[in-house]
Image: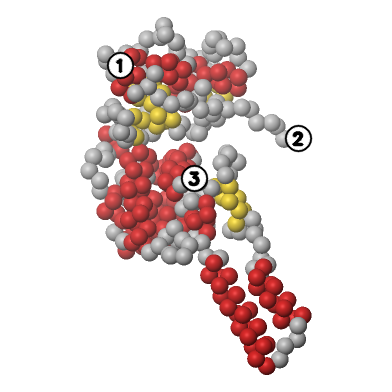
Amino acid sequence: MSRRKPLTQRCYFRIVLQYPMSGLNRHIALLLVLLTAVLSSAFAQPAEKKNTPEEYINLYKNDAIKEMLAFRVPASITLAQGMLESDYGNSALAVYANNHFGIKCHKEWTGETYTQDDDEKDECFRKYPTVYDSYVDHSEFLRSRPRYASLFELKITDYKGWAHGLKAAGYATDPKYATRLIELIERHKLYEFDKMEGIPPVAAEPKSPQGNRTVVTNITSREVYMNNNRKYVIVKAGDTFMKLAQELDMGVWQLYKYNDLNKNSTLTPGQILYIQPKRARSNVAEKHQMKPGETMHDVSQKYGIKLKKLYQYNNMEPGTEPKAGQVIYLEKAKPRRK
C-alpha cells in the first residue's frame, strides 16, 4: 500500500514551497494545507459512521447463530472473533473486503483478494462478496483444519475452552487472544446466543463419515448434513430417487450425477446421497487405506470426492477396484522437490 501523502496535500505543499509568500497569504496557504490534511485523513477512513459493539452484535448475531446450527461453532465465539478481528466491522479489511475474521489467502484460495500490511508487508487476505460469505468461510476454515478438530469435541456452551483452544491452535499470535475473546463474550453476554433450543448434545448427534454436523435448511424437514463442504442426506426405508427428488426440489438426474450413479442403481437405507456436486479433493485427508469389501465408489461417497478424480489420482482404469489394504490417494500427487 502507498505511504505517500494524498495528491491534493502534495499539491498544496508544492505551492507553498514554489511560491514564497509572506504575511497573510502565507498563513492562508498553511491553513489550506492543514485543512487538506484533516479532510484527506477523514476521507481515508473506511466508513463515515463507526459501528458500536451493540450495533455489530445486532447486525450479525443471526449469521453467527445460523453458522452455529450448521457447523457447531459457538455463536459467542464467532461474534467475539468477528468483533475483535474486524474492530466491530470498522477495519479497512472488513469494509473493503468483507473479511471479518482476518483470514489470509492460503494456497487453496481461488477467490478475490485484498492486500494490506499485517505481520509482514503486503500480505494477501481473502475478499468476499458479502459479510455472510465471510462468516461461512470462517466456519468452514475451522472445520477443515485438523488442528482445530479437538474444539468440536467441546460442549457448544464452553466458550472459554474454545477461546483457549483457538489460541493454542495458532489462530492468532496475540498472547492475550483468548482473554480478549472471553472478555468480549462476558461483557456483552454473547454466551446467551449459545443456549439455543434444539441443538443436540455432541454424543447424541447423527454421525456423518467425517463426523460433520447437521445443517438446517429450508428445503426440507429431512436432516441435511455436510461433508467436505457438500450437502447430503441419509437414505431412509421407502425412499426412491423420485421421492427424494420431489422432496428436495431436484431433478432425478442430479441425484444420479452428483452420486456417480445411473438409472439402474438402487437405494439402501443408511446410504449417503449428495444433493450437491462432490468436490475434486478431500479437505480432511490425503489418502485412504482400503478395507475388505470397500469399493472406489464407497471411498468417493465417504470423502465427498468425484469418482473420476479418484481414478485419475491413482492412475487406475475407471471401473476397476483396488485390493484390501491398498492405499488410495484423495488428491493429485504433489511434485517432488529436487
Closer to the N terminus: mark 3 or mark 1?
3
Quadrant where the N terminus sits is: bottom right
Q: Quadrant of residue 234?
A: top left
Closer to the N terminus: mark 1 or mark 2?
1
Q: Name the residue located 72 percent from the left edge and 35 percent from the top edge.
A: 337
Residue 280: mark: none
Residue for badge 2: 338
Q: Quadrant of residue 334?
A: top right
**Residue 90 percent location from the top left of the image:** 46, 61
Residue for badge 3: 129
Tag 3 near tag 1, CB within 8 Å: no
Q: Quadrant of residue 191?
A: bottom left
Residue for badge 1: 243
For badge 1, the amino acid type reads Lys
Quadrant where the C terminus sits is: top right
Q: Nearer the viewer, mark 3 or mark 1?
A: 3
**Residue 118 percent location from the top left of the image:** 58, 58
Q: Could you tell whether 11 is left or right of 268 in the image?
A: right
Residue 154, visible in the rendered structure: no
Q: Nearer the viewer, mark 1 or mark 2?
A: 1
For badge 2, the amino acid type reads Lys
- SS state under label 2: loop
Q: Name the residue located 42 percent from the left edge and 8 percent from the top edge.
A: 263
Measure how far apart labels 2 and 3 are at the Cα level.
40 Å
Towards the viewer: 85 or 90: 90
Q: Could you tell whether 279 is left or right of 315 in the image?
A: left
